[in-house]
Image (cartoon, rainbow, N blue to C red):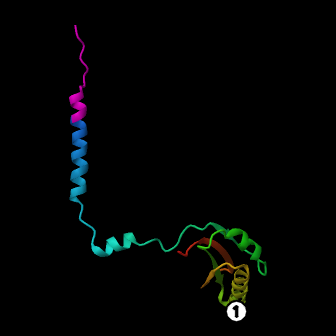
Amino acid sequence: MIVRAASGWQTVIADLALILFLITAQAVGKKPATQSQAEEEKQPPASSSALAVHRPEQGESVREWLIASTTDQRQMATISVGYTQEKRAEALSEAERLLAEADSAGVPARLIATPNATDDVVITVDYLRQQ
């Protein structure tokens, strides 16, 4: 007596064909993206992942850290300063000092100053320039 398998190769092929049909039907049923949506998807992200992050203390020198952290000319430092309304002038003078240190280190930098609930300074280094 010959024992036959409950499921043959024909059943497997039929299952795969059904799966392929369902995937194709789902893809065909989607509406094409409008022109503005397609352009938004092609644009690069506004920011990238930081390669290095440092939270300096008030008055701390960051020149050596910037020199050690930037290894490529495409990298740029971003100095983000958050300040309370009472300490706005102090925060902006600290930001100017940090920008001067970045210039003396030969590292291109940009400054972002925003009102915040707390006073904080964060310096990040990431790829923001193209060459």
Q: Is residue 35 left or right of residue 63?
A: left
| Residue 98: image location, x then y, percent | 71, 82
Q: Is residue 119 left or right of residue 26?
A: right
In the picture as drawn, the residue positioned furthest to the bottom comes out as: 89
Q: Quick one: which residue is furthest to the front in this view?
A: 131
Q: Position of residue 5 (x, y in %)?
A: 26, 20
Residue located beneath label 1 in the image = 89
Q: In the displayed structure, does residue 99 sit left or right of residue 115? A: right
Is 118 or 8 nearer to us in this picture? 8
Determine the main secondary structure of the stretch shown in magenta.
loop
Number of on-image labels: 1
Q: Is residue 9 above or below residue 19?
A: above
Residue at screen point 21% across, 35% down: 14
Q: Residue at x 64, y 81 (%)?
A: 82
Using the image as rendered, state which of residue 109 and residue 13 is in the foreground: 109
Image spot of residue 67 (x, y percent) = 72, 72
Label 1 is placed on what type of residue?
Answer: Ala
Region rendered in magenta: 1-13
* Magenta stretch: includes residue 9: yes
Towards the viewer: 82 or 23: 23
Observer able to see residue 39? yes
